[in-house]
Amino acid sequence: MSHHFSGPNFGFPRDDARLDITDLFAFPKPGDAGKSIVIMDVHPSFSVAPPGPTTTEPFAPEALYELKVDTNGDLIAEIAYRVRFVPAADGGLTATLRRTEGPDAAGVGETGDIIVQDAPVSTGHETHVTEAGPYRFFAGWRSDPFFFDAGGALNNLQFTGEDTFADKNVCSIALELTNTALGTAGVNLWHRSLVQVDGAANGWVQADRGARPSQSVFLPGEDRDAYLGAEPAQDDGFVDTFSHALEHAGGYTPEDARIAARSLLPDVLPYDYTLPAAYPANGRALTDDVGDVFLAILTNGKVTSDKVGPHTDLSSEFPYVGTPHNATPRDGGAGYSATAGEL
């Protein structure tokens, strides 16, 4: 289910939906080869355990949302973009975006040069886009672009083609930036959420992280907390855990399971802005069928499709994800999509 529900028992990290990072997209800007689009989606509008809507507050003011950029292949960030939200006088939220380079990018905190400050957060159907030099920034509720038959996944992979996310919403942090702001043509990307915790080192604890869809939901097992709290440079330590899960899920031999596990780790999204986006080789477009890619690996080729295709409500303009839905619960919770009043 992409990165949705990455907490224990298909719940949320630290029991907070706002900290659940769901999807990471990176693709060249349509019509402008000199720029890229990066979208970090967080906070599903519904939960499955227990079924029902999540909070209508889009982002957690006590959290920090980060995009990490590894420019030299060492799986350590040389560039980081950090977003922090604060309550606004009108009851909404505003966002501040910072950029930092060098050793600080691999660390934790709110340091960095301010790129965007006090940007309004979209809490309904409005689309507040903030421009700052070559950057464009958006944060707020949107239609969830992820497509997958989650019900079939939870029913022993018996897929019917019903798209669980067709009428769901998610909170997007979208960034348009020059390619040079990513540092180099070939980078590794991942995103993470952190939350302030008293007594923690540097005051922050990593709640969730990832780049590749679905694997953090299905594969870490008892090592879930350690995996979500780790860095890509530490992912070699989870090969055995992933291998064990793949042996059981796909009937792999131990040797082949390790090969499959290493194809999923480290948990980063490779992106070269000189090439078209095509997951898993390069970046990820909003229409890439990442669910089918993961199913083929999980089942060792026994299941190759959930029979669901891309959404048709995407936008042709920044931030490219569609406006949030006005829908009512379809099945008492699992089909929840926020109404206009709730947004």
Image (cartoon, rainbow, N blue to C red):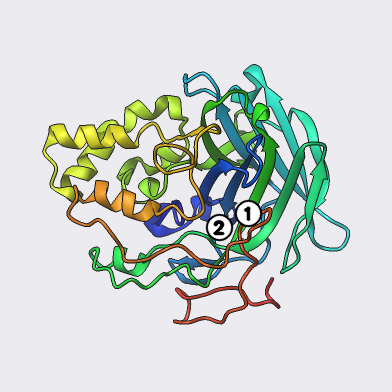
54 lies above or below 239:
below
Q: Would residue 178 appear left or right of 335 to someone viewing this image?
A: right
The structure residue drawn at horizontal position 16% and vertical position 35%, both measured from the top left corner, is: 256
Q: Residue 178: x, y in percent?
A: 69, 33
- Residue type at numbered disc 2: Ala
- Residue type at numbered disc 1: Ser
Q: Which label is found at residue 17?
A: 2
Could one spot residue 124 in this view of the protein?
yes
User: Disc 1 or disc 2, which is closer to the eye?
Assistant: 1
Q: Would residue 195 appear left or right of 307 to someone viewing this image?
A: right
Front-most of 168 and 309? 309
Task: Determine crowd level at label 1: few under 14, some 14-19, many 20+ residues with C-alpha closer than 10 A.
Answer: many
Quarter assignment of residue 37: top right
Q: Which residue is mark 1?
A: 172
Give the residue furthest to the right: 89
Front-most of 250 and 283? 283
